[in-house]
Amino acid sequence: IQTMEIQTLKARIALTRKDKGWEMTSPVQTTADADEVEDLLHYLAGMNIERRIPAAEVQSAALAGDYQLDPPRVTIRFAGPKQSYSLA
């Protein structure tokens, strides 16, 4: 993973992997605590999927409201050199 973005209803945090660790690029530009970022990545990688909802269902305005996904409370995006992922 080269970049990670965490978007909540109130804030956005963007992180970029650098040669010597992680850098926060939003809301401010500063060195991030590499151990904390790696802990978060390991936690997210170890999550179990309890239920998958087909994208067609989520895109339905009525169902998105039923699942309380509109708007998502948290969206996490990951990107690497060849792939990207998004969790909402």
Image (tube, rainbow, N blue to C red):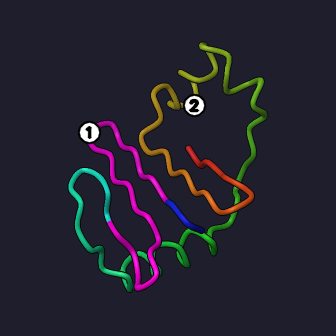
Relative vertical location of residue 46 with respect to residue 65 in this rendering, above or below: below
| Span shown in magenta | 4-23
Q: In this view, does 57 lie to the left or right of 16?
A: right
**Magenta-span inclusion, residue 17:** yes
Mark 1 and mark 2 lie on one chain; the one further toward the N terminus is 1
Coordinates of residue 51 in the picture (x, y in percent)? 72, 49
Rendering quarter of residue 45: bottom right
Q: Are marks 1 and 2 in contact (CB under 8 Å)?
A: no
Residue at 40%, 45% in the rendered image: 7
Within 10 Å of disc 2 (Cα), the crowding (few <14, some 14-19, many 20+) is: few
Coordinates of residue 6 in the picture (x, y in percent)? 42, 52
Element at label 2:
loop
In 3D space, how far apart are the residues under numbered discs 1 and 2 (Cα atoms)? 20 Å
Residue at 63%, 75% in the rendered image: 46
Residue at 41%, 82% in the rendered image: 21
Q: Identify the residue position indicated by label 1 in the image.
A: 10
In this rendering, the count of numbered labels is 2
Rendering quarter of residue 81: bottom right
Q: Which of 5 and 30 is in front in this view?
A: 30
Q: For the C terminus, which image quadrant?
A: top right
Residue 65: image tag: none
Q: What residue type is labelled 2?
A: Tyr
Q: Identify the residue position indicated by label 2 in the image.
A: 67
